[in-house]
Image (cartoon, rainbow, N blue to C red):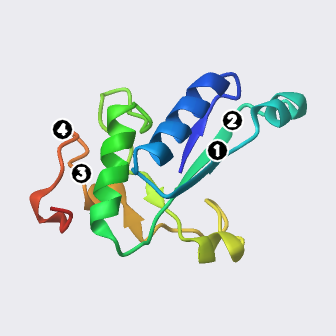
Amino acid sequence: MFFFSPFKTALMDDIVGTAVLDGVVVEAKYSNPETLIAAGSKHGVCCFYLNGNDRVSHKRVLSYMLENGLIRKTKTGKLYNISFKFDTETYAGKYKGSGFSGKIKLADFVDLETGEFILDSGAD
């Protein structure tokens, strides 16, 4: 999942559409930009869905996200160690600051300094 500006509608259409059409993911969704703008929201959310234990799919999605600049970087250029959330955690109402602590993180797959995949990530 990643967050975006509601004013990047065309980009989200392209990112999500390409991800599904090219087989990066089977299913994806994102916030309705018109609704976000009408509500005055500053950020929308996009979700890519895959099986939590499918490390090959994780690598495919992460590669796509990295190639398209969808993972934010710190001021020093290091990738943020984003977490991945299971649907069961969402259904249970677990969000950042309310008991959510990601079990799977970007650093499990990628060197945050270089953006290169970790050889022993099990994704090869």
Rounded to the nearest angstrom, the CA distance separating label 2 from label 1 is 7 Å
Nearer to me, 21 or 70: 21
Quickly name the residue at label 3.
110
Kindly check if marks 4 and 1 are in contact, taking CB atoms under 8 A apart as contact.
Answer: no
Left or right: 123 in relation to 78 = left
Rounded to the nearest angstrom, the CA distance separating label 3 from label 2 is 25 Å
Query: Residue 43 shows which numbered tag?
Result: 2
Say which amino acid is labelled 4.
Thr
User: Picture quarter containing residue 112?
Assistant: top left
Kindly check if marks 3 and 2 are in contact, taking CB atoms under 8 A apart as contact.
Answer: no
Quickly name the residue at label 4.
114
Secondary structure of the residue carrying tag 2 is loop
Nearer to me, 38 or 9: 9
Query: Residue 45 shows which numbered tag?
Result: 1
**Mark 2: few/some/many CA within 10 Å (<14, 14-19, 20+):** some
Kindly check if marks 2 and 1 are in contact, taking CB atoms under 8 A apart as contact.
Answer: yes
Q: Position of residue 11 (x, y in %)?
A: 56, 26
Residue depicted at 64% across the width and 44% down the height: 45
Q: Position of residue 119 (x, y in %)?
A: 10, 58
Q: Position of residue 39 (x, y in %)?
A: 88, 34
Give the mark nearest the N terminus, 3 or 2: 2
